[in-house]
Image (cartoon, rainbow, N blue to C red):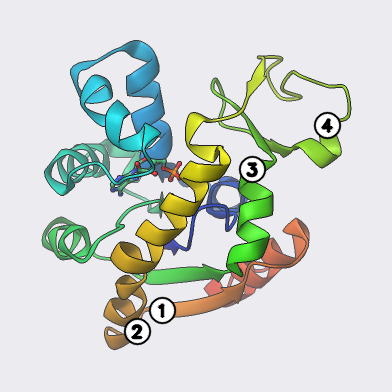
Amino acid sequence: MNIIFLGPPGAGKGTQAQRICSALSIPQISTGDILRRAMKEGTETGLKAKKFIDAGQLVPDEVIIDIVKERLAQDDCGKGYILDGFPRTVPQAEALDTFAKIDCVIELSVDDQVLVNRLSGRRVCLKCGATYHVSMLGEKTTCDVCGEELIQREDDKAETVLNRLKVYHTQTAPLIGYYERKGLLRKVDGDQEVDAICGAILKTLGVRA
Ligand code: AMP
């Protein structure tokens, strides 16, 4: 099954994609993770992307479309995949239609106020992508999964968060109508416990938990 996770930053796309991918044994394709890895490695793409990401802006469509096209052509995507963070603009969705057949789009909806709180308190592991919230970390500063030091993403800082939400509402939210018109959109309430959201997504996908 080829699935898109759509939703504002902080809606829980990454956390849920990780769980659903492991339940379905399919890869999670997070464009944010790919770009952050490229930035860490200092590749040409990483250097190009950095100024957009740090400002809370989207990287140019042509950069991200090529990355996704190449990634979906790899063998492990043959059985299906979850796209987490792509597409984020209508031109990206139109490009995707030329090289992929999407079966379902899960929209995770969450109020802006909840998102601001989630994002500004988020800490991430740059090695494995695991995410945490400061309210649950206490004194802990390392990742439970791989032991790496946790960081606050530059773009999770308060001013940038507001900008990212603005970008979501203007550039990405039109995709809700785009996929609704194609009959592919399924809405899931993202303001619940992580397990409840996961259960709701599996039910929507017709998979038994
Ligand atoms: P994320 O981890 O999905 O929140 O992505 C972090 C940042 O990476 C975004 O704020 C954008 O700057 C960039 N990014 C990730 N995916 C895309 C995309 N599909 N199109 C443009 N920029 C993206």
Q: Looking at the rendering, which quadrant does residue 175 occupy?
A: bottom left
**Decide: marks 1, 2 in contact (CB < 8 A)?**
yes
Query: Would you name the residue on which mark 1 appears?
Result: 185
- On-image quarter of the N terminus: bottom left
Query: Within 8 Å: ligand 1 and the Cβ of disc 2?
Result: no
Query: Would you name the residue on which mark 4 appears?
Result: 137
Query: Would you name the residue on which mark 2 appears?
Result: 180
Which residue is found at the position 32% from the left and 45% from the top? 57
Q: How crowded is mark 1: few (under 14 residues within 10 Å), some or many (20 or more)?
A: many
Callout 2 secondary element: helix
Which residue is found at the position 63% from the left and 33% from the top? 130
- Amino acid identity at mark 2: Glu
Depicted 92 relative to depicted 67: above or below: below
Q: Position of residue 188 (x, y in %)?
A: 59, 74
The outermost residue toward the front is 159
- Amino acid identity at mark 3: Ser
**Decide: marks 2, 3 in contact (CB < 8 A)?**
no
- Amino acid identity at mark 4: Leu
Q: Looking at the rendering, which quadrant does residue 169 occupy?
A: bottom left
Q: Position of residue 92 (x, y in %)?
A: 20, 57
Callout 4 secondary element: helix
| Earlier residue among tags 1 and 4 | 4
- Amino acid identity at mark 1: Leu
| Mark 1 vs mark 2, CA separation in Å | 5 Å
Which residue is found at the position 76% from the left and 24% from the top? 144
Query: Would you name the residue on which mark 3 appears?
Result: 120
- On-image quarter of the C terminus: bottom right
| Earlier residue among tags 3 and 1 | 3
| Earlier residue among tags 3 and 4 | 3
